[in-house]
Amino acid sequence: MDVTAIIMAAGEGTRMKSNHAKVSHKILGKPMICWVTDAALAAGVSRVVVVIGSHADEVRALLDTTYTGDDASRIECVEQTERLGTAHAVRVALEATGIDEGPVVVLNGDLPLIQADTIRTFAATVADGSHAAAVLTMTPPDPFGYGRIELDESGSIARIIEQKDCTPEQAATLLECNAGCYAFDGALLAAHIGDVTNDNAQGEYYLPDMLEILKAAGHANTIYHCEDYRDGLGVNSRAQLAELTAIARDRINARLMAEGVTFIDPAQAWIGPDATIGRDTVVWPQTHLIGHSTVGEDCQLGPNTRLTDTRVGDGCSLDETVAIEAVVDNGVTCGPRCYLRPGTHLLDGAHVGTHVEIKKSTIGEGSKVPHLSYIGDTQMGAGVNIGAGSITCNYDGKNKHATTIGDRTFIGSDTMMVAPVNIGSDAITGAGGTITKDVPDGALALERCEQRIIEGYTERRRARL
Ligand code: UD1
Ligand code: CA
């Protein structure tokens, strides 16, 4: 059966004290809205309706750039221009899309750790017709701020009371909390969403009121209690953002350790949910893997390494390395302190050393760029050695130009390769040369003033002063 997910992401997020949409804040490098959207997509829903409002353009752009292909075709945005509460957000979504049947799962946009399995089980609960609604509940150590579940004698929900509407006694005794994940029978949801009123402490239309309304109309509901309360925690503040980041980090690192990855200190490595690491790789402290980064087996990562959307093969060592959209093959060593920018491709056995920056360049098999270099827009062959301090001068102030270097070529220290320039195979450039003309295969290129020796100079100078 086709399941629709509605993700509510229009709220102001006032408690974040931010100039950005709350759901755009990241957990392990991934915006909260994408955690929730990914969970819905992974659960197999056919349609994801994201309700946007506050910072709508920012959230829409985030979704547009993150999702492509089939995923993108399942996601649509609906704008809630006036934010009158969560029930209003759902009403706007239903009216804009015309959805009035099938299971509808409604998710808070600030519920990043929700699991795909939970959403799936949840949708099934209403799909079989036994219940009109289901609510995910939990008992967190600190229930403050959550809507509290009041159960009836039969164990189903009598009503949900928001923290601000609770009497002190209710706040102290009703410890089962609403996680902000609901499943509804779409037809009943559409028929009754207009019955919600805003007669409460905050003057808002509360979606949790739907439970009491549906019950009054004779429709059964059920709770679905999270075994692990952490799946249901929401993010309203920066403190909660940090708390959930730590939970997500610990879960991911525990999974990776179970899969055979060593962490020197799992509390000091931030591996994103979409990153992968192969067995026997060692993760040193202060390592970050962001986006769709993949690392093979038997690697050493860090300390102080940050990889964004970067692919690393087996047996590599990346010490104090920052890499963005780079590809690193097998047996490559990098750092300490190197910067691999987009379009970098390091072939097997390459070495990129200390204070080296590479951009949009291929470094061939076994080639070495060990010290203090900038290599940009360059195709380099195999077995090349780049002397310390050598750079490609790829930018003339207006355009970028290419450099090519053949196989086994030796670039002397402090060589300036002024692009566009082609340096052949088995060539040598003398130290300190500014190479502006192509160098043929097997040639030596020298560009150097003759050295003068002025004997006894120091003594004469001292006598003058
Ligand atoms: C909500 C629930 C509460 C639950 C908690 C779980 C309501 C009234 N209360 O409280 O029972 O325990 O989540 O974390 O629903 N939003 C809109 N449009 C609006 C208002 C909100 O899209 O007009 C979105 C927000 O962006 C957010 C979500 O709905 O992603 C929840 O809103 P929020 O204000 O965070 O509700 P809570 O006070 O946390
Ligand atoms: Ca919230």
Image (tube, helix red, strand yellow):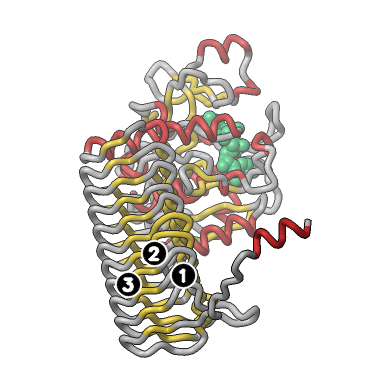
Q: Amino acid at mark 3?
A: Val
On screen, residue 24 versus residue 357, left or right, reads right
Could you tell me if residue 131 is visible in this image? yes
Q: Which quadrant does ligand 2 occupy?
A: top right
Q: Nearer the viewer, residue 437 or 73?
A: 437
In space, the residues marked 2 and 1 are separated at their CA atoms by 9 Å
Q: Quadrant of residue 259?
A: top left
Q: Which residue is mark 1?
A: 375
Q: Amino acid at mark 2?
A: Val
Vertical arrangement, residue 208 with respect to residue 92, above or below: above
Q: Nearer the viewer, residue 134 or 196?
A: 134
- N-terminal of the pair, mark 2 or mark 3, is 2
Graded by Cα atoms within 10 Å as few (under 14), some (14 to 19) or many (20 or more), the crowding at tag 2 reads many
Residue at (60, 44) in percent of width and height: 22
Q: Which residue is mark 3?
A: 384
Residue at (66, 59) in percent of width and height: 459
On screen, residue 6 versus residue 114, left or right, reads right
Q: Which residue is mark 2?
A: 369
Q: Are marks 2 and 1 in contact (CB under 8 Å)?
A: yes
